[in-house]
Image: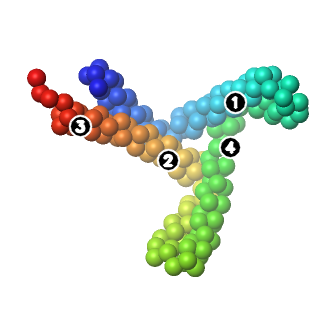
Amino acid sequence: MKPSTKIFAALAGIAFVALGILCICNPGATILTLAVWLGIITLCSGISTLVMYFRTRRYLPSGNMLLSAIFQIILGCIFLSHNLFVAGTLPIIFAFWILIEGIILAVRSFDFKAIHFSYWWLFLILGILAALVGLYSIREPFTTGAFALSYLVGSALIFIGVVYIMTVCGISSLEKKVLPED
């Protein structure tokens, strides 16, 4: 691998780690940024669906793809023009999602117990904990929910950054073993 490619990959990893730390330290900005990105992604998805509709309408004459595209475009525009509202609702949506997923995980743990999976109790504990975090986040969505969502995004970015850096180290190590020294 070219040295410049490794440098760029390492810099990208460092940037991801820095961005992750920034997300964890600034939950309000993280939530607002997520709201804007949600609008952009929804709008792009709608435009993509609209293009696909016009390219396939001879073969798929149903109007449901067109209707879906129109709804996505309208929703994307609403998200982008009212991103403060979207940012305000994201922690609430996240809180309900965590609550529901926690309950599902706790119930599913008994399925694992029934098939004699030895760590079924870990799923039960994690499900209960997730449900409790969800309940508490519903109670305090703009503090607990926003912080939890911000920590999740920040942690994911840090993880991605560490993987980039580890990849560069791994490739460098492999090159030392495989490539002859000059």
Q: Residue 89 carries which label?
A: 4
Q: Which of marks 3 and 2 is nearer the N terminus?
A: 2
Instruction: Inspect the image, locate mark 4, and give the three-letter code of the amino acid beneath it.
Output: Thr
Task: Tell me how far mark 2 sits from mark 1, CA to CA.
Answer: 24 Å
Tell me if residue 131 comes above or below residue 52 in the rendering.
below
Judge the density around disc 2: few (<14), some (14-19), many (≥20) Cα neighbours within 10 Å: some
Give x and y (percent) for residue 9.
34, 28
Q: Where is residue 162, by image quadrant?
A: top left
| Residue at the right extreme, as displayed | 62
Work out whether residue 112 can be spotted.
Answer: yes
Task: Tell how many labels.
Answer: 4
- Figure coloring: rainbow
Would you name the residue on which mark 3 appears? 174
Which residue does the image show at 65% across and 31% down from the upper left?
41
Would you name the residue on which mark 2 appears? 152
Give x and y (percent) for residue 13.
36, 33
Give x and y (percent) for residue 58.
86, 25
Would you name the residue on which mark 1 appears? 45
State left or right for residue 49 relative to residue 111.
right
Instruction: Inspect the image, locate mark 3, and give the three-letter code of the amino acid beneath it.
Output: Leu
